[in-house]
Amino acid sequence: MIKDKFADAVTAPPPPEGDADIGAIKDILGFHIRLAHGACLRHFTETFTDLDLTQKQVSVLWLVDDHPGIAQTDLAQRLRMDRATTMAIINRLQAKHFLRRDRSEKDGRKQALHLEEPGKAMLARAKAAIGEHEAWVKSRFSDKEVRQLIELLSRIHE
Amino acid sequence: MIKDKFADAVTAPPPPEGDADIGAIKDILGFHIRLAHGACLRHFTETFTDLDLTQKQVSVLWLVDDHPGIAQTDLAQRLRMDRATTMAIINRLQAKHFLRRDRSEKDGRKQALHLEEPGKAMLARAKAAIGEHEAWVKSRFSDKEVRQLIELLSRIHE
DNA sequence: CCTATTCGTTAGCAACACTTACAATCATAA
DNA sequence: TTATGATTGTAAGTGTTGCTAACGAATAGG
């Protein structure tokens, strides 16, 4: 119930002038990446309204579960985030009691992150929701195309 | 000079545990789209620091140039943006005297957007910068792969 | 004419990315 | 061992973006 007008915009014939879509921008690869990301983000947000989680938050929960005791800097590197941005996300997750910070024993500067029980439960629900979301994205591709797309995108973010 | 640590993170061997990259998340298509978008956005921002323009602002300048007299709603639909978000972007561009709002003669509710001279000059510079940016993105693909990738991404944002 | 819709606008909220600065900790060289 | 420099987390602040809710003005349709 968010995108009715977009549906129109897509199926409607070019409004006034003739060709009249997005013009030469449509040849710009970066532009398509941004639009595709925006579409994904919108659908993700809808899928996760009940859980009240963002993409980043889910990614962090997921990685902390995969790597118990991981430090914030390590997290930031894996998700290509700023240290300060990571802080903000960790703060929100901690406020919800999804994870805790323990001082690392090996390095007093670092914080060892661990999921709390509510975090584990939420992650389980989140993974189910991600299944839905992924199904939505992948519905327009064959398995081979999905692998192709992932391979191509991987080259961009290394 | 922003991403030295990321270069390390990418070329460095998996830190502690064994496989230890991003784990099962790497099979999630949406995750790769987000990372690729993030990488693009970072490079774009670096490329456009001198011009002090964002992706959205460039897209709007470009479209207004392609479709003189376009209304804000039409812009919003083409770029998949909210009306309110579009307002904010138009306001910033207008504050820099890059474009102006004229009341539409055919529909008193609409604002007809036109580029001002500074806007045209800036768009010319922006298009050159986009050339650089695109070259950076495309450097890792063949022409065929670029066409493929655009086609696949287009299916996501319709 | 009356009603519903559209468009622009304003205001506010949340998330994120970035910067600068600072304190604590660690690593290393003198 | 001490001094120096780098790393880590933290805090505070700025800017961009996306969303909502509400309102007035203009339009379209009955």
Image (cartoon, coloured by chain):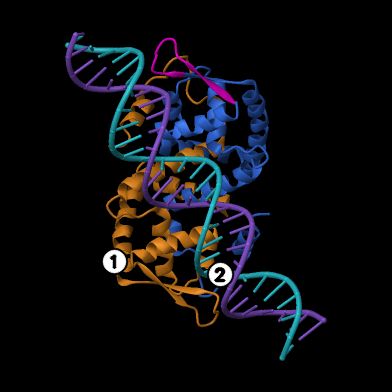
Chain colours: A orange, B blue, C purple, D cyan
Q: What chain letter is assigned to the residue under label 2?
A: B
Part of the protein shown in magenta? B98-111
Front in this rendered view, residue A111 or D25: D25
Q: Quadrant of the N terminus of chain B?
A: bottom right
Front in this rendered view, residue B110 or A116: B110
Say the numbered circle drawn on residue A17.
Answer: none
Query: Which residue is the site of mark 2?
Result: B14
Q: Amino acid at mark 1?
A: Ala
Same subunit under labels 2 and 1?
no
Asked if residue B96 can be seen in this view, the reply is yes
Asked if residue B141 can be seen in this view, the reply is no
| Residue depicted at 66% across the width and 59% down the height | B4
Front in this rendered view, residue A125 or B86: B86
Q: What chain letter is assigned to the residue under label 1?
A: A
Distance between mark 2 and mark 1 Cα atoms: 28 Å
Q: Mark 1: give few (<14), some (14-19) or many (20+) Cα within 10 Å.
A: few
Query: Which residue is the site of mark 1?
Result: A121
Q: Is residue B121 above or below residue B35?
A: above
Estimate the x, y position of residue A60 in percent, counting from the top left. 43, 62
Q: Residue A28 magenta-drawn?
A: no
| Residue depicted at 43% across the width and 48% down the height | A146
